[in-house]
Amino acid sequence: MKKIVERSAYLAAEIALDIAELVISLKGLPKPSSYSDSIFKLGEYTLIPKDFSRRFVYIAGLRNFLAHDYEVDTASDLKRFLKTGLNDMKKFSSLMEGL
């Protein structure tokens, strides 16, 4: 079950970051230098609220953490994602729909 949650969280993070980069590209904004930069740029250019971008940037770290399989226990990170991350993903999705 843990592997399913890890994979699902990874895919959700990857999709959010892909959407962020696509929006940045479509808006003709400077190319982000990293995944976290793509979230920061959305806030910087007021495509999403700046305070939300500063809070949501953790999604890039979560994606990298899960992608590189550091062979550490991910249970606490996954619990935190399930507790707050899913609502953040819903908010991000809603903000992207509004563009």
Image (cartoon, rainbow, N blue to C red):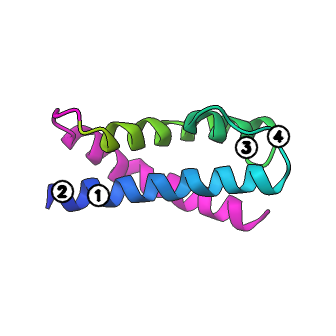
Q: What stretch is highlighted in magenta?
A: 70-99
Tell whether label 1 touches label 2 (CB within 8 Å).
yes
Q: How far apart are marks 3 and 2 (CA)?
A: 31 Å
44 and 84: which is toward the camera? 44
Residue 26 on image: x %, y % = 80, 57
Q: What element carries label 3?
A: helix
The quadrant of the picture occupied by the C terminus is bottom right
Q: What element carries label 2?
A: helix
Residue at coordinates 78% horizontally, 35% vertically from top-left? 44
* Residue bearing the label numbered 4: 45
Tell whether label 4 touches label 3 (CB within 8 Å).
yes
Q: How far apart are marks 4 and 1 (CA)?
A: 31 Å
**Tag shown at residue 42:** 3
* Residue bearing the label numbered 2: 3
Q: In this view, does 4 lie above or below 42?
A: below
Residue at coordinates 69% horizontally, 61% vertically from top-left? 96
Q: Which of marks 4 and 1 is in front?
A: 1
